[in-house]
Image (spheres, grey):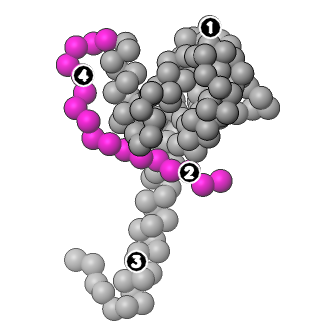
Amino acid sequence: MTRQIILINIEKPVEKDLENDIHWFCDSFGLSSGRDVEEISKKIVMDMLSNLSRNEGVTSEMLANSLDISLSRVNHHLRNLIGSGLVYRRKKVLYLRGGSLRAAVCEMRKDSERIFDELEKIAEEIDDEVGLRSR
């Protein structure tokens, strides 16, 4: 599976506010950038958090009904959330990776470290092959 982790360095909100913090979190992972002008990805994350805090998984149908948007639009945004590593699907039920936002971030950090380790290894091999030396 291809995973794309986007990190955007955005100034953290000064005031503690749950909704603003969730928006900052989503923006920092680029989850609502591009054509998501209605910020559906953020709405999905917020809806998932409210359902998951009650120890319930959610389905794409539940999200579509709750957010009053089409199932196809929800599934489109869910593919991005799953591709980022924040959300996973088991059968038809969706969960936050690791069961919480913090756990999901830790897992995504491990993903990125594995990617960088592999990049560093291949970069070293390329440098050796073309005769470049590291300091």
In three-dimensional space, the C-alpha distance between marks 2 and 3, rounded to whole angstroms, equals: 23 Å
Judging depth in this view, the residue of 88 and 72 nearest the camera is 72
Q: Which residue is mark 2?
A: 3
Q: Is there CB contact under 8 Å for labels 3 and 4?
A: no
Question: Which sits earlier in the primary sequence, circle 3 or circle 4?
Answer: 4
For image coordinates 34% across by 20% down, the residue present is: 21
Q: Main secondary structure of the magenta part?
A: loop
What residue would you read off at disc 4? Answer: 13
Highlighted range, magenta: 1-17
Residue 117, placed above or below residue 42: below
Q: Crowding near pointer 2: few (<14 within 10 Å), some, many (20+)? A: some
**Which amino acid type corresponds to the residue marked 2 in the rendered image?**
Arg
For the image shown, how many numbered marks are present on the structure? 4
- Amino acid marked by disc 3: Glu
The alpha-carbon separation of the residues under discs 4 and 1 comes to: 26 Å
Figure quadrant of residue 15: top left
From the viewer's perspective, is residue 119 above or below residue 92?
below
Label 4 environment density (alpha carbons within 10 Å; few <14, some 14–19, many ≥20)? few
Q: Residue at x 25, y 27 (%)?
A: 12
4 is within the stretch colored magenta: yes
